[in-house]
Image: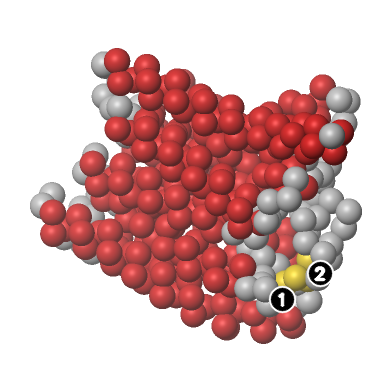
């Protein structure tokens, strides 16, 4: 595949998804008002005023349209099998999130449907690529888990928009380097759609939330692309490095809650990014730190590929330092402020 075709696959979905991501909310916002999809703040919320949720419907439609336009190019996409399974993961995850936004879905049904989405996508990819069924439960769990991870992490303004942009950009690069049209187009569409959501999310006094429709769609899209890339032979470092901060934040928070005997599945605001806002960070500052750490770890990891030299050791150590810095920062700030008050 030549450079001009790759550029087309990067630019077409990005331009379409970005433009629609900016414009579709104008049509969706009145619907959110009509359906009374309002997020009322609670003691566990990071916002203080009622805010419309469900704008993820517009963002998901933007990303899907951009991706579908790229898939329609028959000269480049001679085999759309993996791309269509990624599309299946996107659509079903977004639909489940929208159902949760619109009328609510019980925890058991949500968990069961998330696992079913993981099964459909991973089984389809396993059969198409003729890979080992050993990876089937891994893919099922990975997709269901990351849908929840993105939902758990969607607690402050800007964080999901920036995460979608950062991971989409990283996966688009992986698609470019590995000559995988479906990954390049999918990453580009995702990055542009979630970047376009940011102005709607951070407007003071008039902001809107993605809701579960947007966070579920984001998690399903990322996880479906990750499973497809892994089963297609892409280096695991390309796939995991953009996700490490989200996984570390969620994993450490759940572990801390389990150790304390708390009901880990209940709503809370003890994630690292939320504790940073408690220490005085603005929403955008906290979301920006998460994204900066994500991009730094991704750049360090990708620059060291293939992992056959001493560069790999330095990359791993620096990535661990970045993760550790992020996870410990709220406690460090709290101790620093406590020491300052003591004087």
Q: Residues within 10 Å of mark 1 (few under 14, many from 20)?
A: few
The answer to the question of whether label 1 and label 2 lie on touching residues, with beta carbons closer than 8 A, is yes
Q: Earlier in the sequence, mark 1 or mark 2?
A: 2
- Residue 156 horizontal/vertical position (percent): 68, 55
- Residue 186 horizontal/vertical position (percent): 37, 54
The residue depicted at 26 percent of the width and 24 percent of the height is 306
Asked whether residue 117 appears in the rendered view, the answer is no
- In the picture, measured across the screen, residue 195 lies left or right of residue 76, that is right
Q: What residue is disc 2 on?
A: 49
The residue depicted at 65 percent of the width and 60 percent of the height is 157
Above or below, 210 against 272 in this view is below
Q: What residue is disc 1 on?
A: 205
Secondary structure of residue under mark 1: loop
- Quarter holding residue 152: top right
Judge by depth and name the residue closer to the eye, 61 or 121.
Answer: 61
| Residue at the farthest left position | 2
The disc label shown at residue 327, or none: none
| CA gap, disc 1 and disc 2 | 9 Å
């Amino acid at each position: 595949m030549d450079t001009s075709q790759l550029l087309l696959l990067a630019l077409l979905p990005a331009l379409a998804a970005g433009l629609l991501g900016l414009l579709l909310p104008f049509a969706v916002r009145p619907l959110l008002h009509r359906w009374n999809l309002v997020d009322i703040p609670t003691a566990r919320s990071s916002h203080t005023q009622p805010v419309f949720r469900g704008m993820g419907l517009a963002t998901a439609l933007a990303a899907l349209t951009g991706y579908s336009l790229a898939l329609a190019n028959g000269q480049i996409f001679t085999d759309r099998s993996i791309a269509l399974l990624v599309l299946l993961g996107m659509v079903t995850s977004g639909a489940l999130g929208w159902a949760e936004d619109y009328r609510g879905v019980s925890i058991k049904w949500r968990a069961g449907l998330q696992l079913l989405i993981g099964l459909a996508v991973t089984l389809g990819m396993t059969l198409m690529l003729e890979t080992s069924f050993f990876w089937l439960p891994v893919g099922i769990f990975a997709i269901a888990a990351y849908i929840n991870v993105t939902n758990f992490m969607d607690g402050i303004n800007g964080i999901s928009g920036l995460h979608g942009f950062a991971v989409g950009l990283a996966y688009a690069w992986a698609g470019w380097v590995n000559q995988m049209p479906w990954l390049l187009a999918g990453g580009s569409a995702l990055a542009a759609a979630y970047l376009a959501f940011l102005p709607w999310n951070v407007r003071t006094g008039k902001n809107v939330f993605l809701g579960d429709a947007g966070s579920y769609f984001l998690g399903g899209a990322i996880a479906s692309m990750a499973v497809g890339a892994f089963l297609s032979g892409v280096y695991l470092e390309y796939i995991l490095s953009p996700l490490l901060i989200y996984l570390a934040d969620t994993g450490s928070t759940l572990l801390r809650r389990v150790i304390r005997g708390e009901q880990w599945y209940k709503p809370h605001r003890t994630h690292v990014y939320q504790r940073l806002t408690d220490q005085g960070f603005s929403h955008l500052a906290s979301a920006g730190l998460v994204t900066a750490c994500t991009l730094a770890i991704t750049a360090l990891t990708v620059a060291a590929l293939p992992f056959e030299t001493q560069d790999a050791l330095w990359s791993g150590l620096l990535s661990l330092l970045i993760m550790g810095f992020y996870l410990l920062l709220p406690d460090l700030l709290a101790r620093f402020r406590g020491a300052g008050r003591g004087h």
